[in-house]
Amino acid sequence: MSRIAAFLKSLTLSELFSGLSVTGRRFVDRKVTIQYPEERTPQSRRFRGLHALRRYPNGEERCIACKLCEVICPSLAITIESAEREDGTRRTTLYDIDLFKCIYCGMCEEACPVDAVVLTRIYEFHFEKRGDEIIGKEALLEMGRRHEEQIATDRAEDAPYR
């Protein structure tokens, strides 16, 4: 009996009409596709994107060359060299982050005792030639300068979670 039912079902094309009914229902539904350059998806305050180095309000860089971020980085993407200044404090002479190695885990941000290295909300970046994926200290400080307002806002909003 099941062979006869399957034969009659194939003659009436019921599977085809069942699939077309699903297509017809979805055809009139609201579209969920986002037109990327013009429209943006909502982004979490805790999103981890491109790195930045911050400065104090007086203009001095925050990084004290403790090298905790370099030590804790699971992918070994951070390279730091430091030197002692005339006043006896240490500061970085080299602070490089290899963005090809980085897994954007945020452990460097968590390990920093002075909140110097942060992960911003920037996710739109590209490289045009070999070697551009390694971001140096000056570029990181410039990134922090340009986006300090957003970084400070995110830090203030996340304060209850820290």
Image: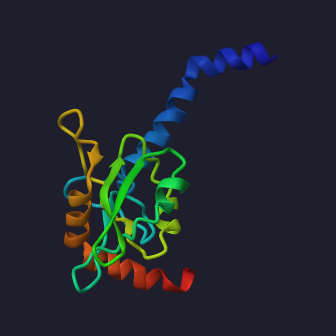
Q: Is residue 123 above or below residue 134?
A: below
- Image x and y of residue 58, in percent: 23, 86
Closest to the observer: 69 or 11? 69
Q: Using the rendered view, name the quadrant where residue 53 is placed.
A: bottom left
Seen in the picture, residue 59 relative to 102 is either above or below; the reply is: below
- Taking depth in this image into account, of 118 and 48 the one nearest to the observer is 118
Q: Tell me what residue is drawn at x 46 percent, y 60 percent.
A: 67
Q: Residue at position x 42%, y 74% from top?
A: 115
At x 35%, y 76%, the residue is 88
Quadrant position of the N terminus in the picture: top right
Which image quadrant is residue 153 in? Answer: bottom left
Quarter containing the C terminus: bottom right
Q: Is residue 39 left or right of residue 105?
A: left
Q: Depth check: 107 or 94 in front? A: 94
Compared to 152, does 25 lie above or below? above
Residue drawn at x 67%, y 14% as measured from the top left: 7
- Residue 13 place in picture, x, y as percent: 54, 23
